[in-house]
Image (cartoon, rainbow, N blue to C red):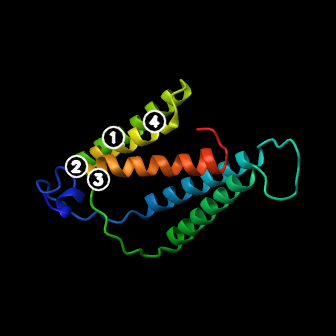
Amino acid sequence: MSEADDLTGPHEDTVETTAATTAPGMERIAAAVVLAFGLWMLMAARGIQVRNETGGIDPRWWPTAIATGVIVCGLWMLINALLGVKIDRDVEASQRVGWIQMFTTLAGIAVVLFAWNLGISFVVLGPLFLLCLNWIYGLRKWTSLLLFPAIIGVLLYSVFQLLLKVPL
């Protein structure tokens, strides 16, 4: 199996693909959803209760920065959609495999959140989730199945648990 085989999906060589058509209405809806999500994030970030107002970087800072970035991206998408800006992209029409992968990913996220609420550590759940996602999306080499999730798990643990002192 070559490196290129590792990056292709499990059924990509057997499915005939056609380019997806443009959908201006869908682009406007997607932009509006991103914008609304960013605004919701901003309201939620600003609603975080802080014991001591420091006037500087506090627990609201990063969520507010991320929400602002999402809002800017949503506005950019909306302006492009309303002005009819053509964006060159290589988008394929939806396929059954893609829908299965998407719903499996969403189900996996739900399982991880449920297990996390039961008290299972994210240090265990994160790499396990990545391993499953790699398998679902067709990656089969040991480096993508085992090494990548292990490295990401160590990085997340190091940054959040050790550096930022945020319990996982």
Image height check: is 167 above or below 120? below
Q: Which-is-in-front pick, marks 1 and 3?
A: 3
Image height check: is 143 above or below 168? below
Which residue type does callout 1 highlight? Cys
Disc 2 or 4, which lies upstream in sequence? 4
Which SS class for mark 4? helix
Q: Which-is-in-front pick, marks 4 and 1?
A: 4
Q: Which residue is mark 1?
A: 132
Q: Which residue is mark 2?
A: 140
Q: Position of residue 135 (x, y in %)?
A: 27, 44
Q: Which residue is mark 4?
A: 124
Q: Position of residue 137 (x, y in %)?
A: 28, 49
What's the distance in space between the residues labelled 4 and 3, CA to CA?
Answer: 18 Å
What's the distance in space between the residues labelled 2 and 4, CA to CA?
Answer: 21 Å
Q: Position of residue 64 (x, y in %)?
A: 71, 55
Q: Which-is-in-front pick, marks 2 and 3?
A: 3
Image height check: is 139 above or below 106? below
Are the two marked residues, 2 and 4, in contact with CB atoms closer than 8 angstroms?
no
